[in-house]
Image: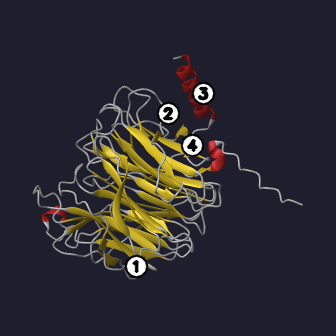
Amino acid sequence: MRKRLTVLLLVLLQIQAIAQIKNIKLAEEKEGDRSMVEPSITVNPKDPKNIIAAYSLDRIKFTKDEGNTWEEVTVTSPFGVFGDVVLESDPKGTVYFFHLSDPSGKGRSDEAWLDRIVSHRSDDGGKTWDEGRSIGHNPPKDQDKPWAAIHPKKGNLVVAWTQFDKYGLQDPACQSNILISSSSNGKKWSDAIQLSQNPGDCIDDDNTTEGAVPAISNDGKIFVVWSNAGTLYLDRSYDDGKMWLRNDIPIAKQEGGWNMKIPGLGRANGMPIIKVDNSTSKFHNALYVLWADQGNGEDDTDVWFMRSTNWGDNWSAPARVNKEDSKSHQFLPWMTVDQTTGYIYVVYYDRRAYSDNQTDVYLAYSTDGGYDFTEVKISESPFTPTEDHFFGDYTNISAHGGIIAPIWARMDNGKTSIWTAIIKEGDLGIKKEAAPTKKK
């Protein structure tokens, strides 16, 4: 008991020693608009002062001065824009924006809803965007939950997602599967191929095959993780996606499944995120996977992390990122790796400080390949979500060149808003490692 109290005190002292991170409100819900959820953000690796954020189905804000000023644009597409937004940047500074389609603009009431994934490209840091390219159009099947990755040197792209025979259909014969498509420059996309060998149902619940996230290594190895029926799966390609080892490798249990009940939220998912360390750090080529689950009980949601140092053949035992010992909820996590340092950053919602549904936003970071994480509360004040208002399925975070940009939603008085914080390594007390001395 004394040891636990000592560790908790040290953590609290460490958190208190760091100055409050400045929060930046990017947007807030207007009357009748309930789409201020599921934001995405990217730090441009060519110019880290250029940070681009997406939210509210079709709106994007960008800054070119490290967050001091922001400009908003609206993205349009003949295929429609309907949420699940994803932003990624390539090494030359091109920014890509992915989302679901809604050609009619009628949402769920139209059969064409979710008929494809759409990608847009910006060559000026988020100011202007092309009209969008179609990915995975395969009527009458529905396409949902995309995520993308970019080759850290070549700049070629992949996007993975779930294909439903029919979204939401409660028929045992209805299947969901993981698909993937690739492109050299975002202007033309390959025909989708199916990765998953074990289909899920179409209900959009624990037994649905969902949450596909890809990652690409410096030498073109591609990895995709997803969740289905309480298990995290991995598929791999070692040749830029020309050939896939479609063997659905089970890499971890997700106790209780990916769809979790969090008080104050209609639903919350713990779908996995995968990243590869492409930096020159001593953890170069390590694979990292992050997720959340309720293995410790429905009143105790936790964020979990594990690594592989042999391209996914073997994995470390899952380690808990959140260090508190109380039964509380840490949920909707996301992870990134600063590829200039190899440092890992994780953002998530946290209720350790409260006995009700008040919620903070935390950042955890590791400078040693995820063996140890330090946690910092980054939200300026708590908020309380309500179940009658959809809160989204994810947060997001990006980092490059020592600049860390998390993004999240919060809810005040029943209205959602989108927030970010532009954080530097020094703000967290991270000391830069001295450059190695050359031998004489």
What element does badge 1 sit on?
loop
> Label 2, label 4: how many angstroms apart (C-alpha)?
13 Å
**Label 2 or label 4, whichever comes before in sequence order:** 2
Give the residue drawn at x 61%, y 54%. 283
Amino acid on which disc 2 is placed: Lys
Relative to 331, is 64 on the left or the right? right
354 or 286: nearer the eye? 286
Among the 4 quarters of the image, the one containing residue 114? bottom left
Q: How was this image coloured?
A: secondary structure
Return the residue at label 4: 371
Amino acid on which disc 3 is placed: Leu
> Label 3, label 1: how many angstroms apart (C-alpha)?
50 Å
**Label 4 or label 3, whichever comes before in sequence order:** 3
Residue 307 percent location from the top left of the image: 50, 50
> Label 3, label 2: how many angstroms apart (C-alpha)?
11 Å
Front of the two marks 2 and 1: 2
406 or 5: nearer the eye? 5
> Label 4, label 1: how many angstroms apart (C-alpha)?
42 Å
Relative to 327, is 230 on the left or the right? left
Return the residue at label 3: 10
Residue 266 percent location from the top left of the image: 24, 43
Return the residue at label 1: 130
Residue 318 percent location from the top left of the image: 45, 42
Amino acid on which disc 1 is placed: Asp
Q: Give the class, few, some or many, for how many residues have Cα within 10 Å of label 4's Cα (few <14, many ≥20).
A: few
